[in-house]
Each structure stands twice: as C-alpha cells, then as structure tokens.
Image (cartoon, rainbow, N blue to C red):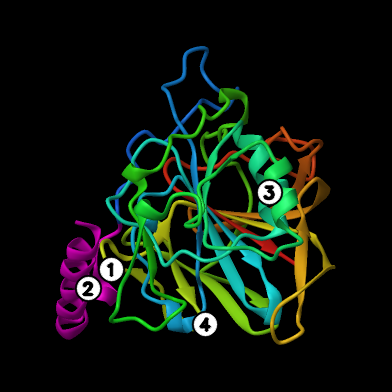
Amino acid sequence: MPRELLRALTAAWIVLVVLGGVACSPSQPPPAGSPSPPAGGAPATSPPAPVLAVKIDNVPDARPPVGIGAANLVYVEPVEGGYSRLLAIFAGQLPPLVGPVRSARETDAELLPQFGHPTLAYSGAAPELLPVIDAAPLTDASDANQPAAYSRDEARPVPHNLFLDPAELPPGANWPPRNRPVTGPTPAGGTPTEHYEVSFPAATTEFYWSPQEQRWQVSMDGEPYAAVDSGRLSTSTVVIQRVRVRDSAIRDAAGNPSPIAETIGSGPVVVLRDGRAFDGTWSRPAPDAAATYTGPSGEPLPVGPGQVWTVLAP
C-alpha cells in the first residue's frame, strides 16, 4: 500500500502545482497529541507520546517532502557539503508515509537521548557512525533493520526516493513529560520581525511571518517549502539555536567532513513568535535533558502550541 499511496500523493501534488495551491494552501493544524504543558512545566498526567524520529533529506532533488506536517518538532541540522538535513520528531500523530528518508549523523545521537528511548528511522550511516548509534538509547529502525517499512518511489531520483510507512515500525518509548516543550503566552517585548534567514554554506532556511495565518511560513533556498500531503509548511514557533559546529573524522564520498552540531551546553538563541523575535540563551546540561530558553533577565521564553522548528545554526 505505501507505494500506491505515494503515487496518489504525487498526483495530488501535481494538481496543487498546476492550480497554484502550494503557495496559498492553508496552514496545517497542530499535530494531534502535541504536548502543550503550561508555562510552569508539564502537567502531572501527560498523554502517552511514543517517539519516532525520522531523518529527512533536504537537498533540492529531494523535494517536495511527505508527512512532516504531522511532526511535533522539526530540527534543521548542518551536514557535509554545506547543506542541511531534517530530523522530524513524531509523538502522537503518525502520517501514513514520511520521506524522503536519508542517513543518520552524529548530531542525532546527541539530540535523541532527551526523548527517552525513541525509534530512529534512517537509511544508512557511515561505518564509523554505526557503533555510536548502537550505543545510543534508541531503537535502530533503519531500512537495513526494518526493510518491510520502506519503499522507493521510482518517479524520483535515487537516493532521494526512499519513503517510510511508520505503522510498520516498533514504537518508541514515551516522551518524558519533563522534556516536552514548555508552552505559554507570548513574552513581553521582542523585536517586530517579518523575515528571518539562516544561511549554511550551500543552503538557506527562511521563515516569513504571515499576519493572516498568524504563523511562520517556511522556505528553503529561497523557495516556499511545501509537503506533498499538507501544502506550504508553517509553524507557530521557530527556535534559532546558535551552536558550535565541528568537523568529525567521518567524510562523504566527495571528501567533505561530516559536521557535528554540539547541542549540549549553552549559547545564544532567538525565538520567533507572533511576528516578533526574542533574543536569549539556550541551555541543555545533559544528554537526557531538553534545551530550555531564557530571556536576558533569566525569564522563560516559552514556545507556542503545535509544531516547533529548531534550526541548529552555526
């Protein structure tokens, strides 16, 4: 069924493009089951939220994506060659298909322990990285380990054509309530902002505030970023997390070093909410802790309800 579903979605995408619907499609609603604890932290009783993390290809040949509108969190990570790749976190609502799926990175092994013991879906990794993934607290659900969950779209170029049926994977452990996003009202202050851009050496990620939708619309490399199944992607909150990026010993086929974004520690952050930018500091003291965000005076910078995008910006 996944292959037939993918063909149907692709046909729908073509219709959207012909009709101009991609640029003006309405925002997707917040993912069902999105954790929305109050500003003081997660409630005493939180709904079950088994975590599935999926590595998503993000070079131009891999677009448009499928399924990521249902994610709770989307991370934008630097990868070799100056490009970016996405790590989509699903906890509650699983779409019927997700992709294109690509390989994991060492950055993922550092990010994922905060989610307890998630399931990680990816396609391959450098041989030197496999022991790191094996040692991480996660269920390895790569295409090598769970081949029945993956299929290829022959209409797309290899290797940007591998798609995942999430229902075929073992579920991840429950998202620890203490590490779920802290939501709350928009803080006071901030700087009115209509557009924010993060540049990687060979890619850009941009966010445009839409007063009509009251959401940040996502663009990649100067073009609207839209999913086959949900149209133009948008979000209530964007976190620009400035991190130290260092080269690992792992290199790709072209000899480019694989960068590692260091997400444990602290550094500058910009939180985009409600058409405003809030400067502050991010802090993540340990692998099993989530990042927290505070303003200049130490006040919390909560996120809005629904999907959150976090850009790991050099």
**Which residue corresponds to the image point at 20% horizontal and 81% vertical from the top-left?**
20
- What amino acid is found at the position of numbered circle 2 in the picture? Thr
Q: Is residue 182 visible?
A: yes
Q: Nearer the viewer, residue 270 or 101?
A: 101
Side (left or right) of 61 relative to 182 = left
Residue behind mark 3: 133
114 lies above or below 147: above
- What amino acid is found at the position of numbered circle 3 in the picture? Ile
Kindly check if marks 4 and 3 are in contact, taking CB atoms under 8 A apart as contact. Answer: no
* Nearer-N-terminus badge (3/2): 2
Residue behind mark 1: 228
Residues rendered magenta in the picture:
1-27
Q: Nearer the viewer, residue 166 or 16?
A: 166
**Closer to the observer: label 4 or label 3?**
3
Residue behind mark 4: 221
Mark 2 crowd level (few <14, some 14–19, many ≥20, 10 Å Cα):
some
